Image (cartoon, rainbow, N blue to C red):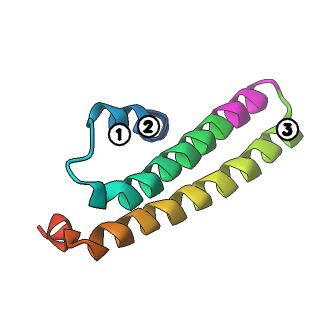
């Protein structure tokens, strides 16, 4: 589904600006969480850009180049996922467990 893919890629590329829009931290204790979250955003955005490049390469019939971009995107997404897990762990360490309860 192209719409779902597009929305996901847009969410990944807008992550950094959404974090900035949230404003200053209410507490210095959240700095480790924010650092990991920003790193996650950076890698997810880079991965999304690589996917976009891969799609462009496919459209131009350059399958080897598309494969290269997809491999790069996977590496970026994996890094972004690791940093996101770190952010969650750091938030939990300062008592953020209530954030993850419904």
Tell me whether circle 3 and circle 2 mark residues in contact (CB < 8 Å).
no
Crowding at mark 1 (Cα within 10 Å: few <14, some 14-19, many 20+): some
Element on which disc 3 rests: helix
Main SS of residues in magenta: helix
Tell me whether circle 1 and circle 2 mark residues in contact (CB < 8 Å).
yes
Quadrant hosting residue 58:
top right
Instruction: Give the CA distance from mark 1 to mark 3.
Output: 32 Å
| The disc label shown at residue 93, or none | none
Q: Residue at x 54, y 56 (%)?
A: 80
| The disc label shown at residue 65, or none | 3
Where is residue 52 shown, x and y percent of the image?
64, 32
In the image, the segment drawn in magenta is: 52-60
| The disc label shown at residue 19, or none | 1
Considering only order in the chain, which callout, 3 or 1, is on the residue closer to the N terminus? 1
Q: Residue 31 colored magenta? A: no
Q: Which residue is mark 2?
A: 16
Element on which disc 2 rests: helix
| Nearest to viewer (mark 3 / mark 2) | 2
Residue toward you, 73 or 93: 93
- Quadrant placement of the C terminus: bottom left
């Amino acid at each position: 589904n192209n719409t779902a893919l597009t929305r996901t890629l847009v969410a990944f590329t807008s992550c950094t600006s959404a974090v900035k829009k949230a404003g200053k931290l209410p507490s210095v204790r959240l700095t480790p969480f924010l650092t990991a979250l920003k790193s996650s955003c950076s890698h997810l955005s880079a991965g999304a850009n690589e996917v976009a490049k891969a799609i462009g390469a496919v459209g131009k019939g350059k399958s080897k180049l598309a494969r290269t971009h997809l491999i790069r995107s996977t590496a970026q997404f994996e890094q972004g996922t690791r940093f996101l897990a770190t952010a969650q762990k750091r938030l939990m360490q300062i008592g953020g467990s209530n954030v993850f309860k419904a």
